[in-house]
Amino acid sequence: MSLIKLQGITKAYQLGKTQVPALKGIDLAVERGEFAVVMGPSGSGKTTLLNIIGLLDRADAGSYLLDGEELAGRDFNEMAGLRNKKIGFIFQSFNLIPVLNVIENIEFPCLLRREDKKLLRARVERVAEHVGLSHVLAHKPDELSGGQRQRVAIARALVTEPEIVLADEPTANLDSATSEQILDLMQRLNADSGVTFLFSTHDPRVMRRAKRVVQIADGRLVDGQDAAAANVAVLGAPPH
Amino acid sequence: MPALLAIATRNVFRNRRRTFITAAALVVGIFAVVSIRGVLNGLQGAIIASTVKGMTGGFQVHRAGYLANVLSPPLTLDFALDDPSLAGLAKLPGVTAVAPRIMFGGSLSVPKEKEEDTPEPLFFMATAVDPTLEPQVCPDRAGLMSAGSRFDEAHLLVGEAMLGTLDAKLGDEAVLLAPDRDGALNGELSHVGGALKSVMPGELKVAQVPLAAAQRLLRMEGRATELAVAVKDLAQVPSLVAQARALLGPTYEVHAWDDVATDRRTFMQRQNAISALVSVVFLLLMLLGVANTMLMSVLERTREVGTMMAVGVTRAQVLLLFLLEALSLGVVGVAGGLALGTTFVAALGAKGLTVTPPSATVALTLYPSSSPAFLVVVAALALLGCAVFSLYPALRASRLRPVEALAGR
Ligand SMILES: Nc1ncnc2c1ncn2[C@@H]1O[C@H](COP(=O)(O)OP(=O)(O)O)[C@@H](O)[C@H]1O
Ligand SMILES: [Mg+2]
């Protein structure tokens, strides 16, 4: 059974009196342990798609199965609980809570589930160490570099042990060296612990590392492409 | 939930300037409310003391139906002072003294050597009191006598204004005329002993007459219309009134001091109402500041709300977060205001505040004080107000849709 199965997902935004279609019927399956990228030009619908998968927004129509469970049409509080339990987010602009320090930011989603604080601390410190933050645990986000902030976000996304981590253009605000480090980290996490990652990007560096690339254009998935083909399409023929 | 509380309190100190201004407004407002009430407590304490010790005693005994006729004191509703049922009154525990009185209306003239120089007799309301018993119940009456006055079996006191009109001086003969309890006009000779000062504005023409002279004038020897009773502790008055009622039975009526001096009670109630109104206006102004601060805080933090929602914070928790933030702000302001206000009131109370009410001749020394119950009510209302006035911003934040909040919209 696929971890995620989307069928016929559509979404339109209301702009004044006109409807702007953003997704025009998406069918997509994501398997456990994937390290997949949704690739497409700006305005193609990447963010909209990830928002729907992340239960931040609702599709207008279609079916969304997570772990075989139909999630379309859940109410807000159910969606909040499901996000907390099953989904980790990594945002383009990090989105940490400024008044909380590193360790508090990482543990925050777990506190919402009323986890025992002592047991939690140990796990949080382990995750923080895993992403290379051990030396800045007491720092506030505004005392950290962009790369460190994104590591905090990654730790926060992982600490709840979610089914899937969604990352909407996670490297867009980082320089290329830092981007590479962050991508290394996520790749390692995927390889070591089998966490499922789904990215959106239009950054070829991200795409190059993906095991699978899903192309989106104008609200529709472009069929029949695997990572290699996408690489060819975007980067030209690989050197032999 | 402690994590939300931590975020809320830290957010209060995030924008220090705005927090400072809002909290300062709360401090000033609470300070003003506490100070006004404190001074009023002092004023009312002085009014109560001067009423009880200068006029009414702790409670009074009359014949049943007497106070209902108070505009024209009915001499017919009198009683014999040797009525055996009255004997137990002075023995009630907590009662320290009992003084008989007669309230009556009459006229007074001070004859001059030449008859054409003699001013018209003046109508007055008189309180006839016993020169030795009365000071045990109303010691402050002495303070109302102008300097050098005499009040004894042969001397009476008249109000300052009246004394001037009569063109009288100490020792002048004074002729009292009054209808007795059967309606027959009678006369009695006394002497001008001095002037009575007025405490409260708007006092009528008044006189204080020795009880024995009044009893002869009114043909009421051995009788009185009123017993003023002194008590050790004013807080005991309601229970003593009940005991006295049980003791005296239905031929007598017993009233606490504030049921006798209803004008003063009304006056103080009006003061309370006005100060409550002023306090509420102050409170509302402060709370508008809180509402404004919270609205700005919500608008600035839209994306943060989106982030929290993304990691699983529910709408109710967002609402709670901003309410906690407003309450934290409120606690800071209220605590500061209460501390400053009570300190100020305590300082005034220790020093005493001497004021002369308009048109009164006697200076009053007030001892302002704060009552804990009032402070609790003020703090509770202010904090409740903080929550209520930040409800709109908090609801607004909680109703954001996650995607829109994340996009900062
Ligand atoms: N809140 C919105 N209101 C109106 N139109 C929107 C909104 N969000 C996105 N769109 C439109 O939907 C389409 C897809 O947007 P988006 O999912 O953000 O694409 P991407 O992330 O690939 O750049 C675009 O045409 C965009 O203009
Ligand atoms: Mg986007």
Image (tube, rainbow, N blue to C red):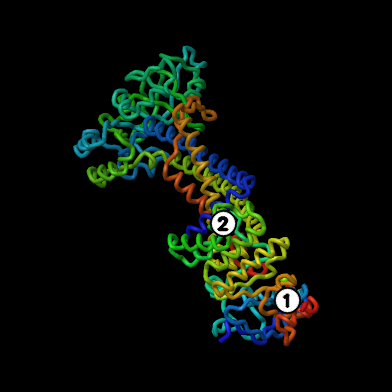
Residue type at the position of mark 2: Val
Residue at the (55%, 40%) spot, across then down: B32
Where residue B118 appears, x then y in whole percent?
Answer: 49, 18
| Direction from residue B97 to residue A57 in the image, left or right | right
Task: Kindly tell me whether residue A230 is visible in this rendering.
Answer: yes
Residue in the foreground of this view, choosing between A7 and A157 = A157
Residue tagged by mark 2?
Answer: A102
Look at the numbered disc 2 and give the secondary structure of its residue: helix
Residue in the foreground of this view, choosing between B244 and B248 = B244
Task: Kindly tell me whether residue B325 is visible in this rendering.
Answer: no
The numbered mark at residue B200 is none
The answer to whether tags 2 and 1 share a subunit is yes
Where residue B33 appears, x then y in whole percent?
Answer: 53, 42
Residue in the foreground of this view, choosing between B133 and B21 = B21
Residue tagged by mark 1?
Answer: A39
- What subunit carries mark 2? A
| Direction from residue A136 to residue B234 in the image, left or right | left
Residue at the (67%, 58%) spot, across then down: A146
Total labels: the figure holds 2
Residue in the foreground of this view, choosing between A79 and B181 = A79
Look at the numbered disc 1 and give the secondary structure of its residue: strand
| Direction from residue B33 to residue B53 in the image, left or right | left
| Direction from residue A239 to residue A142 in the image, left or right | left
Q: Residues within 10 Å of mark 2 (few under 14, many from 20)?
A: many
- What subunit carries mark 1? A
